[in-house]
Structures are given as C-alpha cells and as structure tokens.
Image: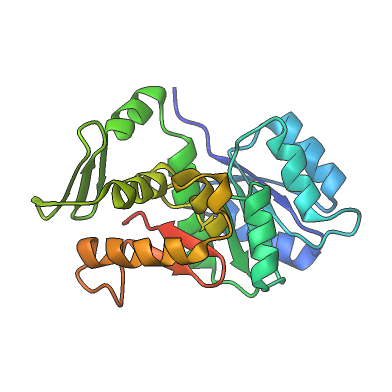
C-alpha cells in the first residue's frame, strides 16, 4: 500500500499567507487543510489527525499559545510557530507551552521546509526505529552510543564529564527542536536550577570545545539567540 502524503494544518488568519503556504506545500507532496481561527484550528487538528500544525500566534479569536496548550492536552504532534512576533519572550512562551519550533515572519520557504522535514522525521519514526535511536545517535561525524555512554567524533572517542554528557543526551533526546534555557536546565540540573542560566552557558561552551571543529562557528550545537539551543540534525 502506498504511503499517504503527510497532512499539515495551517492555522493562520491572513488569507494571503494561507494561500502562499497551501500552494507551496501542496506542490511538494503535502496534504494541506486550513483554519482561520484558533477554535477552528483546534477542531481541525482533533478531527483530521494531522502530522504537523503550522500556527500563527496572533489569531483573531484567541492567542496561539492557547491553541498550543489545547493541542498538547491530547496530542504530541509537531507544532511549528510562524509569527510576526519576534521578541525573545514570545519565542520562549511558545516553546515552553509546547511548540516544537518557531520561525519569524518574513520567512524563507526553504527554511520552513527544512524545519518541517526535521519535525516530521522526529515524530514519524517507527517504534523499532525509536528503540534503535535511543541506543545509538549518529549525526554527521558525531556518534553517540547512549547505551554505553560513548561519544566519538570521526571515530575518535571524546571524554565528557557526567554533566557534559547529560547535557548532550538531553539535546539528543530533543534533536532538531529548539529548547529554551529553562527546559534544558530543568532536565539536566533539576527545577531548582532553572534560573541559573550561567551554568548552561558554561557547559555548552565546554561541550562545543570538545565536539565542534570550530567552537566559534558550531555546526551541531546552535544558539537560538535569547531563547536557548538546538542540536541541529545534519541533512
């Protein structure tokens, strides 16, 4: 049986942007449905069971944050924010509410497609593949054996301290997804350390020194300015 096209729901109140997204995504093999209000979008997401949602934050009837929370109450499907709101606080609020990614308008369609591919790859893996990935993570020349806690670059083993390894493991768990500083601090150090962002900066710098060919221009461990970090999945 042929695999059906991935289904994407666009929740956006601007008809021109909806039309642009529908045309671009439809010609690239996606089945697209639209909603111009948050309430309509929640209904569409619950009825159509999409593979991914593209969501604007500034909807006419409700805040996009509330749409994220509603979807997260019953589903873990990927949600990519596409918003004119460019402030760091808006990004942090959306990501903390459960969004998987955040693009600011105006945006490049090629970048949106890349983010969609990453989100779908992360969510559509089979249970068997997830089990394999949970034991072995390979990304470019980075190889991490999570079962045996072994890290290597170009087949050369890299020694990490326990905290450095725990930080890397958390980023691998959410590979391709933007994580806020608070999310990372909570998973690595615990809730009581969520305000100690300097810990994270120190250990991220150490991790880059060990894993990146040029720590000043990292290719794996990317900074999302003012928001947090992303472990980039190499294409």
For the C terminus, the image quarter is: bottom left
Residue 150 x/y as whole percent:
18, 41
Residue 69 x/y as whole percent:
74, 43
| Relative horizontal placement of residue 204, taking residue 79 as reference (left or right) | left
Residue 19 x/y as whole percent:
71, 61
Q: Residue at x 46, y 30 (%)?
A: 3
- Asked whether the viewer can see residue 22, the reply is no
Q: Residue at x 89, y 59 (%)?
A: 60
Q: Residue furthest right?
A: 61
For the N terminus, the image quarter is: top left
- Residue sitting nearer the eye, 25 or 10: 10
Dividing the picture into quadrants, the one containing residue 56 is: bottom right
Residue 227 x/y as whole percent:
56, 65
Q: Residue at x 67, y 73 (%)?
A: 86
| Relative horizontal placement of residue 168, taking residue 159 as reference (left or right) | right
Dividing the picture into quadrants, the one containing residue 141 is: bottom left
Vertically, is 26 above or below 1?
below
């Amino acid at each position: 049986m042929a695999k059906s096209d991935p289904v994407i729901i666009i929740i956006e109140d601007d008809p021109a942007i909806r039309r642009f997204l529908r045309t671009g995504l439809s010609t690239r093999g996606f089945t697209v449905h639209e909603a111009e209000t948050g309430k309509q979008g929640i209904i569409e997401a619950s009825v159509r069971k999409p593979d991914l949602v593209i969501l604007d934050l500034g909807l006419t009837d409700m805040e996009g944050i509330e749409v994220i929370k509603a979807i997260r109450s019953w589903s873990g499907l990927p949600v990519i924010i596409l918003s004119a709101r460019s402030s760091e606080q808006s990004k942090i609020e959306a990501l903390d509410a459960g969004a998987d990614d955040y693009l600011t308008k105006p945006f490049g369609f090629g970048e949106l497609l890349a983010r969609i591919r990453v989100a779908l790859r992360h969510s559509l893996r089979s249970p068997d593949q997830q089990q394999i990935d949970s034991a072995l993570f390979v990304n470019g020349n980075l190889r991490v054996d999570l079962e045996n806690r072994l890290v290597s670059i170009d087949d050369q083993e890299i020694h990490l301290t326990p905290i450095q390894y725990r930080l890397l493991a958390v980023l691998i768990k959410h590979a391709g997804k933007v994580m806020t500083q608070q999310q990372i601090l909570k998973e690595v150090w615990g809730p009581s350390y969520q305000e100690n962002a300097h810990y994270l900066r120190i250990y991220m710098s150490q991790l880059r020194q060990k894993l990146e060919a040029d720590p000043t221009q990292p290719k794996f461990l990317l900074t999302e300015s003012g928001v947090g970090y992303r472990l980039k999945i190499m294409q």
